[in-house]
């Protein structure tokens, strides 16, 4: 039996359109579930935008993260209600000698707001429901799993 984990990969580029990447969940039985996902808002999905609070993508500078498997409710705009926390929170990192902090990084459905401002947003409800079902089945045996993040330049 394998240890479950997840990855998020996305092309980092400047675009007025939302850039989608993929969220991949690796299950203990060796199966994997891959769904379209995004991070950052349109026009703010470059590698340099990782430092832009509230608009840029999840920073890959501090990867790997931990994805908490206990679902929680959030009334934050654009989350669709059910979210999974990503830790550490806050995220503190430095780039070219400048210190940055990002907070409230979540995995959620990309609901009614194009893009996920620093979070990982699963693009469709159907795909989010699929991921939710698998994450909930892993819990409580696993409290958290490793989450690797890669922004491809």
Image: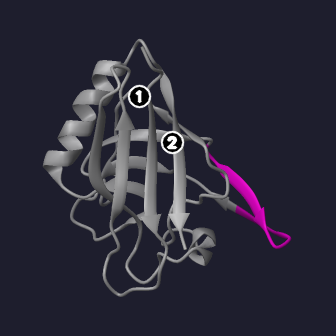
Q: Assess whether mark 1 and mark 2 are in contact (beta carbons under 8 angstroms).
A: no
Q: Is residue 89 visible?
A: yes
Q: Which residue matches tag 1?
A: 69
Magenta run includes residue 90: yes
Magenta span: chief secondary structure: strand
* Residue drawn at x 62%, y 77% as measured from the top left: 48
Query: In the rendering, at what x and y percent does residue 138 appear?
Result: 35, 20
| 123 magenta-colored | no
Res 86 label: 2
Is 149 situated left or right of 117 in this image?
right
Count of numbered circles in the view: 2
Q: Position of residue 128 (x, y in %)?
A: 23, 45
Residue 47 or residue 132, whichever sits in front: 47
**In the rendered view of the protein, which quadrant contains the C terminus?**
bottom right
Instruction: Work out which quarter of the rendered image holds the N terminus and state it.
Output: top left
Task: Please rate how many residues cluster around mark 1, counting C-alpha atoms within 10 Å: few if below 14, some from 14 to 19, many from 20.
Answer: many
Kindly give the residue lying farthest to the right in the view shown.
97
Instruction: Identify the magenta region.
Output: 89-100
The earlier-in-sequence mark between 2 and 1 is: 1
Q: Look at 35% across and 31% down and name the residue there.
A: 71
Q: Is residue 118 visible?
A: no
* Residue 120, above or below 56: above
Counting from the top left corner in percent of width and height, residue 131 is at 26, 38
Q: Secondary structure at mark 2?
A: strand
Q: Nearer the viewer, residue 65 or 30?
A: 30
Please tell me which residue is depicted at 22% across the width and 29% down the height of the picture: 133
Query: Which residue is at 32% across, 76% downward?
Result: 18
- What whole-number distance in Å separates the C-alpha atoms at marks 2 and 1? 9 Å
Q: Tell me: residue 69, above or below residue 140.
A: below
What crowding class fits label 2: few (fewer than 14 Cα within 10 Å), some (14-19), or many (20 or more)?
A: many
Tell whether 10 sits left or right of 66.
left
Instruction: Using the image, determine if residue 126 lies above or below residue 133.
Output: below
């Amino acid at each position: 039996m394998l240890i479950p984990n997840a990855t998020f990969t996305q092309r980092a580029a400047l675009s007025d359109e939302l850039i989608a990447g993929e969220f991949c969940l690796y299950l203990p039985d060796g199966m994997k579930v891959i769904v379209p996902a995004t991070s950052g808002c349109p026009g703010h999905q470059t590698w340099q935008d990782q430092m832009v609070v509230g608009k840029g993508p999840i920073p890959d500078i501090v990867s790997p993260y931990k994805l908490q498997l206990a679902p929680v409710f959030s009334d934050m705009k654009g989350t669709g209600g059910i979210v999974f926390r990503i830790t550490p929170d806050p995220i503190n990192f430095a780039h070219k000698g400048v210190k940055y902090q990002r907070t409230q990084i979540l995995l959620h459905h990309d609901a009614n707001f194009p893009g996920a401002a620093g979070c990982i947003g699963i693009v469709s409800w159907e795909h989010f429901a699929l991921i939710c079902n698998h994450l909930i089945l892993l819990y409580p045996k696993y409290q958290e799993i490793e989450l690797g993040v890669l922004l491809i330049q």
